[in-house]
Image: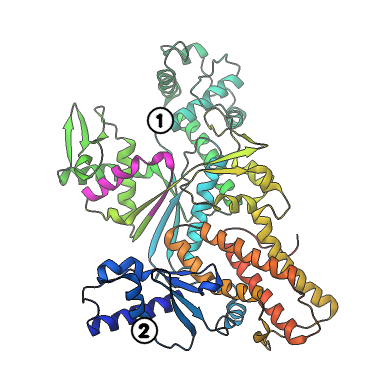
């Protein structure tokens, strides 16, 4: 419907241009919104207020000219000018009635569109370092990324979901060394465990596997392990302490044994993460290993590309990318004086590889603490003549988990965190998925654990699911009473009261809400829609009987209820939430 109204406005403005009332250069931005108050029509546009200056006339005068050009349309009851120049559109009473049969006929396909025209999009999200199980802070990015992928697929995009496995670098060495030190504990060595190592019980579990499968094969005397190591915090430097231990681990174990410990830790945690996400309803098409970038020479290729274009210079033995030439706040090192490439060099290679794989749009979903990386990554893409404007970076604020008014810890390093798995087992996937995308992801979110557990209408996901279950109960009641509902012979003109008119209007705008949520990358638009639709349904259900003596009225009301159920189900499934038939 919004597209029809937009086209109507475009045609009217084109007519005014041809008549000379508007300049040939007039290019308006047209926005159509669904009205919240039926008294103000079904839809409204602020096109005249937004473009009055460009038109060279007052908004209301421009509105009068446009409305005059719109004329009579068989699907419009009337068009009114309101306030300083809003244009309100009132659809004919019977127009919305057709939505019931449309929904029932299209069923699960209702709301889908080809808006994306099969545009090839990659979404990379979560990508947490595999140094521990996912915690509830990661859950928001997981729910958001998976839901955005659903929305983009529903609107005709060709979507690939990817997890970037950071399986190289210092954090992974800290993980591997943490496991080995716990293994030495189990083997009988007296170990002072580093303050900067990974502390969680999962480290003990991996170490136990290493000991169970290898006995004392990896045992080294504790004195040798700590020989030449800087003191730990608080007397010394915890960073130097753990780095020295990593170096000793590599030297004492040798390359092969160290890699065995490293890979056991990595593979165990990647498998845990993969299972946790799958059980959360989050699936990936690709798990991309950071190590591929080095092993396939992609990091060297990226640096060479920058050198060939004159974007790199040498200073104090290191190679620096001239990122300030492209809007970054300072230049960035891509290769250190010791010849090792940096994390940033890997980031450049990874994003170069994304576009080399043929994606027309690349979406990264990062935690808000990665804000500083945006400018430098886009600078590198621009410097290599890749389309930086096709890289879209969406920042997600981590969710804070509250129970009984107290915030719970999220620290992976200390081991004091609430795993995503624990949240799922506590409140269920449905509540977790729904709550995580209930608000804009760039806003802080407090996840109320007590509310998510509630089986009451105060719980928003329960409230929406309850609407679906209530409609299913209507179907069961009809079957129990032997009442047949003839959905192919429905006199929808019977749907006259205000509750029914509001529901009809709400059903009409569902496809536009899905398209808007996808285009704006805001799944909460669909969440808000479902809550409004459910509220309208509950109000209608509480005010009117469905299974009445009047057969035409009964068929019409049940048909509207079934259409409402279908839309609720479609919307919930897009959010990764189930639509239960009983509650």
Within 10 Å of disc 2 (Cα), the crowding (few <14, some 14-19, many 20+) is few
Residue 259 in picture, x, y percent from top left = 45, 32
Visible residue check, residue 199: yes
Q: Which mark is residue 68?
A: 2
Earlier in the chain: of badge 1 and badge 2, it is 2
Within 10 Å of disc 1 (Cα), the crowding (few <14, some 14-19, many 20+) is few
Segment colored magenta: 363-384
Mark 1–mark 2 Cα distance, whole angstroms, equals 69 Å
- Residue designated by label 1: 170
* Residue 540, above or below 189: below
Contact check, label 1 and label 2, Cβ < 8 Å: no
* Residue 192, above or below 198: above
State the predominant SS element of the stretch in magenta: helix
Please state which of residues 88 and 203 is positioned toward the viewer in this rendering. 88
Q: Is residue 368 magenta?
A: yes
Residue at the image point whose x is 73% and y is 83% from the top: 553
Secondary element at tag 2: helix
Please state which of residues 299 and 580 is positioned toward the viewer in this rendering. 580
User: Residue pushed farthest right?
Assistant: 481
Q: Is residue 365 left or right of residue 558?
A: left
Residue at the image point whose x is 51% and y is 17% from the top: 220
Residue at the image point whose x is 23% and y is 42% from the top: 303
User: Which quadrant of the figure contains the C terminus?
Assistant: bottom right
Q: Is residue 305 left or right of residue 443?
A: left
Residue at the image point whose x is 29% and y is 48% from the top: 378
Visible residue check, residue 166: no
Q: Is residue 34 magenta?
A: no
Q: Is residue 117 left or right of residue 321?
A: right
């Amino acid at each position: 419907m919004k597209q029809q109204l937009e086209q109507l406005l475009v045609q009217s403005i084109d007519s005014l241009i041809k008549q000379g009332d508007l300049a040939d250069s007039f290019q308006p931005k047209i926005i159509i919104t669904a009205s919240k108050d039926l008294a103000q029509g079904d839809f409204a546009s602020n096109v005249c207020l937004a473009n009055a200056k460009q038109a060279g006339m007052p908004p209301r005068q421009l509105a009068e000219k446009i409305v005059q050009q719109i004329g009579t349309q068989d699907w419009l009851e009337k068009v009114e000018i309101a306030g300083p120049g809003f244009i309100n559109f009132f659809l004919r009473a019977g127009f919305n009635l057709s939505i019931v049969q449309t929904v029932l006929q299209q069923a699960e396909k209702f709301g889908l569109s080809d808006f994306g025209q099969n545009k090839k999009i990659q979404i990379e999200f979560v990508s947490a370092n595999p140094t521990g199980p996912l915690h509830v802070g990661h859950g928001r990015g997981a729910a958001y990324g998976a839901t955005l992928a659903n929305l983009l697929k529903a609107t005709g995009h060709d979507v690939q979901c990817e997890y970037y496995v950071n399986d190289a670098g210092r954090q992974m060495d800290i993980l591997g060394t943490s496991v080995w030190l716990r293994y030495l504990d189990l083997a009988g060595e007296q170990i002072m465990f580093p303050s900067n190592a990974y502390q969680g019980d999962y480290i003990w579990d991996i170490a136990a596997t290493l000991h169970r499968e290898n006995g004392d094969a990896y045992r080294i005397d504790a004195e040798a392990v700590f020989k030449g190591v800087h003191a730990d915090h608080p007397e010394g430097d915890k960073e130097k302490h753990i780095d020295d231990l990593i170096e000793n681990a590599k030297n004492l174990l040798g390359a092969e044994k160290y890699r065995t410990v490293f890979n056991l830790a990595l593979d165990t945690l990647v498998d845990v993460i993969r299972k946790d996400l799958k059980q959360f309803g989050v699936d990936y098409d690709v798990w991309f290993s950071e190590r591929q970038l080095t092993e396939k020479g992609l990091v060297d290729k990226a640096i060479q590309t920058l050198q060939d274009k004159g974007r790199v210079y040498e200073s104090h033995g290191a190679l620096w990318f001239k990122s300030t030439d492209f809007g970054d706040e300072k230049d960035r090192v891509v290769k250190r004086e010791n010849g090792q490439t940096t994390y940033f060099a890997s980031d450049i290679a990874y994003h170069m590889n994304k576009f080399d794989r043929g994606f027309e749009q690349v979406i990264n979903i990062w935690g808000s603490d990665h804000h500083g990386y945006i400018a430098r990554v886009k600078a590198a893409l621009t410097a290599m003549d890749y389309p930086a404007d096709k890289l879209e970076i969406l920042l997600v604020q981590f969710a804070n988990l509250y129970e009984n008014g107290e915030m719970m810890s999220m620290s992976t390093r200390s081991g004091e965190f609430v795993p995503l798995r624990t949240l799922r087992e506590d409140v269920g996937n449905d509540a977790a998925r729904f709550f995580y995308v209930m608000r804009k992801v760039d806003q802080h979110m407090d996840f109320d654990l007590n509310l998510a557990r509630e089986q009451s209408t105060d719980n928003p996901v329960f409230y929406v699911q309850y609407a679906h279950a209530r409609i299913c109960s209507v179907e069961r009641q009809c079957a129990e009473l032997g009442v047949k509902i003839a959905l192919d012979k429905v006199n929808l003109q019977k749907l006259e009261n205000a509750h029914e008119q509001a529901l009809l209007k709400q059903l009409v705008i569902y496809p536009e809400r899905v398209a808007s949520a996808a285009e704006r990358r805001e799944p909460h638009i669909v969440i808000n829609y479902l809550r409004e639709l459910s509220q309208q349904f509950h109000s209608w259900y509480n005010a009117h009987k469905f299974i009445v003596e009047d057969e035409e009225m009964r068929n019409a009301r049940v048909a509207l209820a079934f259409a409402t159920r279908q839309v609720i189900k479609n919307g919930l499934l897009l959010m990764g939430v189930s639509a239960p038939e009983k509650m």
